[in-house]
Amino acid sequence: MAEYYDCIAFIKTKNDKTIARQIGSAKKRDDGGFNVYLDALPVNGNFAIVPARQKQASTPARTGTAFKRDEMDDEVPF
C-alpha cells in the first residue's frame, strides 16, 4: 500500500505568526522517492513533506433550501 503525505508551506503573516498551509500531496514510490502533486506553488519556494493528517468526518450536506418559502421576507426596502 502506498504511503501518502501532505505538502505544507509555512507562511509568515503580517502579525509575525507562522501558519501552515497545505499546498498539495505526495506519494512515496517503491524506490524510496516521492511523486509530488502541488495544487499551489509556495511563494517563498520552500515546502515540507509531512505524514498525512487524518481527515475529519465532514458534516452531512443539507437537503432542501435554508428557508421555507413562506418564511422568506419578500418586501423590497425601496
Image: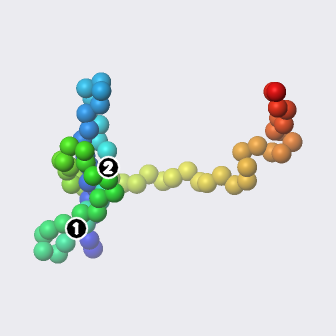
Q: Is residue 42 above or below residue 13?
A: below
Q: Is residue 8 above or below residue 36?
A: above
Q: Secondary structure at mark 2?
A: strand
Q: Earlier in the sequence, mark 2 or mark 1?
A: 2
Residue 48 image offset from top left, x and y in percent? 20, 50
Q: Is residue 78 above or below residue 10?
A: above
- Badge 1: how crowded within 10 Å, few (<14), some, or many (20+)? few
Q: Residue furthest front?
A: 78
**Amino acid type, label 2:** Gln
Question: Measuring 82% from the left and 32% from the top, which residue is drawn there?
Answer: 76
Residue 22 image offset from top left, x and y in percent? 32, 49
Residue 75 image offset from top left, x and y in percent? 85, 32
Picture disc at residue 35: 1
Quarter of the figure that contains the C terminus: top right
Question: Measuring 25% from the left and 26% from the top, which residue is drawn there?
Answer: 16
Q: Would you say residue 52 is visible in this rendering? A: no
Question: Measuring 72% from the left and 45% from the top, which residue is drawn there?
Answer: 66
Question: Measuring 83% from the left and 45% from the top, which residue is drawn there?
Answer: 69
Q: Secondary structure at mark 1?
A: strand
Q: Quadrant of residue 20?
A: top left
**Amino acid type, label 1:** Asn
- Badge 2: how crowded within 10 Å, few (<14), some, or many (20+)? some
Q: Is residue 74 above or below residue 48?
A: above
Q: CA distance from mark 2 to mark 1?
A: 16 Å
Picture disc at residue 22: 2
Residue 8 image offset from top left, x and y in percent? 26, 49
Picture disc at residue 45: none
Q: Quadrant of residue 61?
A: bottom right
Q: How many marks?
A: 2
| In this rendering, position of residue 69 left or right of residue 65 | right
Q: Residue furthest top?
A: 15
**Residue nearest the viewer, comparing 74 with 56:** 74
